[in-house]
Amino acid sequence: MESKVTGVIKEIRDEQIISEKFKKREVIIDESDVKFPNVCMLEFTQDGTDMIDAYNVGEKVTVQVNVRCREWVNPQGESKYFTSLNAWKIERVEGEAPQEKAESLDAADGSEVLPF
């Protein structure tokens, strides 16, 4: 099942190496501009983990996702079900300029120097 999520990047987590053949990176998106606000955790996997490097917390984005559902049967024979949102494309919302990570520097006289 394919869908999209539009919202503001709330958190970008570090890449996780699950095994030598699988890696993922989680991104938290805040969808507060909708009738029923959501906070969603999206997963970028494999080569897609690098896609998020061009984005910063606070940017408004649209992310294309595939909804993945799977069943796992535990050793006691009970079925457990898992759902994940696998991201495969990310774009800035038109009209939104990327927000740069501003750092203040100290001048030699102790005053603050702005980064522009």
Image (cartoon, rainbow, N blue to C red):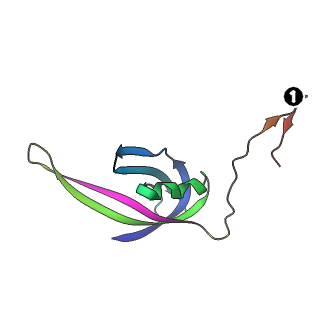
Q: Residue at x 60, y 68 (%)?
A: 93
Image: 2 above or below 50: below
- SS for dot 1: loop
Magenta stretch, residue numbers: 80-93
Magenta run includes residue 85: yes
- Disc 1 marks which amino acid? Gly
| Residue count near mark 1 (Cα–Cα under 10 Å), binned few <14, some 14–19, many ≥20 | few
Task: Give the main secondary structure of the magenta stretch.
Answer: strand
Question: How many marks overall?
Answer: 1
Q: Is residue 3 magenta?
A: no
Which residue is pictured at 18% across the width and 52% down the height? 72
Can you give x and y, in whole percent of width and height, for residue 34 in the image?
Answer: 51, 65
Residue 97 pos. (x, y %): 69, 63
Residue at 77% in and 39% down: 104
Quarter of the N terminus within the rendering: bottom left
- Seen from this angle, which residue lies furthest left? 77
Mark 1 sits on what residue? 110
Percent coordinates x, y for residue 71 in the rendering? 19, 56
Q: Is residue 61 above or below residue 116?
A: below
Q: Is residue 85 visible?
A: yes
